[in-house]
Amino acid sequence: MKKSLLALVLASLCGSTMAANVYDKDGTTLKIDGRVQAVVYNGANAKAGDHDSTLENSARLGIGGATKVGDFKLQGYSQWDMADGSSKRGDSIKARDQYVGAEYANFGGVKLGRYKGAINYVTSVTDVFDDFGTNAQSANDERNSSRIEYSYSGYGFDGKLGFVTANDSYSLENGFKADKTAKIENAYSVALGYTFPIALPLSIRAGHELVNGQNDKKDGVRLSHLDDVRTTVLGVSLGDAAQGFYGALSYTDRKFGFMEHDVKDLKSKGFEAVVRYTLDCGVSFTAGYNVIKYKQDNVDSKKVISVSQRSIPLYINWQVNPNFNVWTEARIDANSRDTWKKLNAAKLNLSYGEDKNFASIGARYTF
């Protein structure tokens, strides 16, 4: 296998354009990647003490390999959030992605393990901030185990088919706090996209996911009160997020269905818009708008919950070179005090839970 092709395979495998080549011989490679960063957060972000400003350090480490067997490319990858010595993480190491996979010629590949699901391919068009974006989309950080996924990319088309086996700790977003982690029987997902090869690349994407709660019972009581979770996502982007003009829109429609006859579906609909411009020197300016609306009726079809959460993320980043970048970021809260009372009273699993404006400045080295 040529080194140029191996670099492309491992960049896709590791999710990073930077990786240290540890071994490369006879069609087999081993590479490591990671990052170290330090970020200063303002007092409103409650990172330390009673809303005191603080500097937070963190590190991430990944290792992956690939080997060729005939027309097959076999690969594996694991990535962890490393211990940072703080009271938040201390000496613990937390798994992020862990999977094995195989690709065959130009027919796509299969991946098994822990990673983000298929519909994240759709919503990722607006995931271009560091900390304070993606407040209005589902599945942004739903990195779950027990996944099986087939993916294909070619001729401008991208497609993903996903399946999740039974999982007792499946992460879910944009529902109630009580349902952040759920017991599920299985899940199915599909995502499709096409990129038009024009001067400013135009990408149109769509996806759907169905998550089924566990049917198992203990003492006659079902272990999961979730019946199912249905999510439909749409995304469109214009341009290249790494150079020149870039604009993107994403829409999420998620519905939580419950087993209890007197509990109606919880519905969330999120919309995000992003505009970015990157100068030739590597400095980019990004602004966005996020709004998500929650609704739930009672048995008499009267509104129990009807409230929206809005925010405006702002971001300036300087990619000094492929390894090092610095940035400053802010999130402007666009909710009234009355809105926050309703949001907190509803006990929703929100991206952030205070009527505060957040800001940060950070630096990162990626290898």
Image (tube, grey):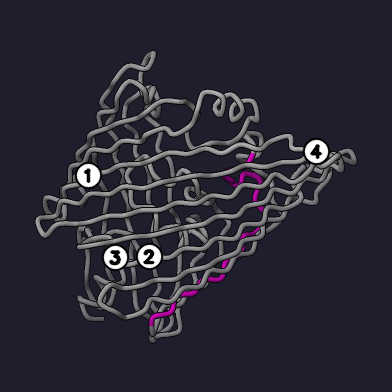
- Magenta residue check for 166: yes
Sequence-wise first label, 3 or 4: 3
Marks 1 and 2, Cα distance to the nearest angstrom?
Answer: 20 Å
Task: Name the foreground residue: 171 vs 342.
Answer: 342
Q: Which residue is mark 3?
A: 11
Sequence-wise first label, 1 or 4: 4
Q: Which residues are magenta?
A: 156-175
Q: Which residue is mark 1?
A: 316
Which residue is most to the left?
A: 281
Residue 57: horizontal and vertical position, in percent? Answer: 27, 32
Marks 2 and 4, Cα distance to the nearest angstrom?
Answer: 38 Å
What's the amino acid at mark 3? Ala
Residue 147: horizontal and vertical position, in percent? Answer: 56, 60
Secondary structure at numbered mark 4: loop
Q: Which residue is mark 2?
A: 237
Mark 3 vs mark 4, foreground winner is 4
Q: Are marks 2 and 3 in contact (CB under 8 Å)?
A: no
Secondary structure at numbered mark 2: strand
Sequence-wise first label, 3 or 1: 3
